[in-house]
Amino acid sequence: MNPLLQVDNLVACYGLLQAVRRVSLSVAEGEVLALVGANGAGKSTLLRTIAGVHPVTDGTIHFDGTNITRVPSHHRVAAGLALVPEGRKLFPEMTVEENLLVAARRARPGPWTVDTVLTAFPMLRPLLGKPAAVLSGGEQQTAAIARALMTNPRVLLLDEVSLGLAPVAVKSVYESLHKLIRDGATLVIVEQDLQRALSVADRVVCMLEGRVVLQSVTQAVTREQVTEAFFGLSRVSTSSAKTEPSLGQQT
Ligand code: ATP
């Protein structure tokens, strides 16, 4: 099956710093990919580059077979790529409902409306009229996921899902994600909590210093192997993992 999202030899920089170094990965329709790695590994930059909010220095991004490497971010949203950014980035003075409706202005046709979002995430219903700024961290993360869904994405890019959330809020956010996964959503999840990441993902990609150091079907890799890759103690590419062409390429 052709991948829905295909990233090849992607490079993204801040000035002279290469934050993403020749990363290649693909995501199939209905797949959940966990992107893990230590602070500064390049996960957020990779996600932001795929979403089009950070420029590509080199390499390509294909979405459903179309080269979108130079396509502006709002056209990527319209094509079905949605980003839930690190820190949620809701419009703080707008109500939850207004945040949802703003996103709907860029929406593809699809199942997600305010009604269906509230059915999926009933915890948002009593919060609809409240400014986003007064929501708790977990409520904001759920609202941010709901806002992204309002664009009817084909791939949802979720940055730092559980960062800064209380354990009870993490549990609640993941319950929401499990619903989406059961319904066949295609997700790329950046998550520092390895346990959580491995529990939801079909495949795991680990980054270190801008490079992919592990890429595997989740079931084919142990938590210890991921942890070792996370800390740069080993490089793993299991037999059932996609071959990682950037391994060993130093730039
Ligand atoms: P974190 O979990 O800390 O967000 P990350 O894996 O998402 O880590 P990035 O945030 O993508 O990593 O950072 C990758 C590299 O780019 C790091 O060396 C970081 O210091 C650097 N970096 C990130 N944002 C900027 C910026 N706005 N300006 C300059 N350098 C940046």
Image: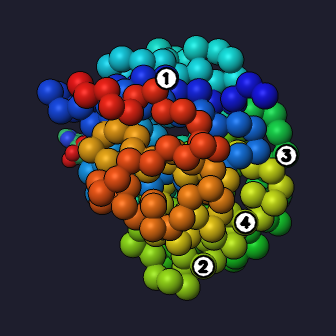
| Residue type for callout 4 | His
Residue highlighted by disc 4: 178
* Mark before the other along the chain sequence, 2 or 4: 2
Residue highlighted by disc 1: 8
Q: What element carries label 1?
A: strand
| Residue type for callout 3 | Pro
Label 1 to label 3: alpha-carbon separation: 31 Å
x, y (%) of residue 154?
72, 38
- Which color scheme is applied? rainbow
Q: Is the Cβ of the residue at disc 2 closer than 8 Å to that at disc 3?
A: no
Question: Residue at the location (63% across, 77% down)?
Answer: 172
Between marks 2 and 3 in the image, the one whose residue lies nearer the viewer: 2
In front: 186, or 35? 35
Q: Which mark is residue 171?
A: 2
x, y (%) of residue 153?
70, 40
86 sits left or right of 76 in the view: left
Label 2 to label 1: alpha-carbon separation: 34 Å
Q: Residue 111 carries which label?
A: 3
Q: How crowded is mark 4: few (under 14 residues within 10 Å), some or many (20 or more)?
A: some
Question: Residue at the location (82% across, 66% down)?
Answer: 119
Q: Please tell me whether residue 215 is drawn above or below residue 108 in the rendered image.
A: below
Label 3 CB, ligand 1: below 8 Å? Answer: no
* Mark before the other along the chain sequence, 2 or 1: 1
Query: Image quarter for residue 86?
Result: bottom left
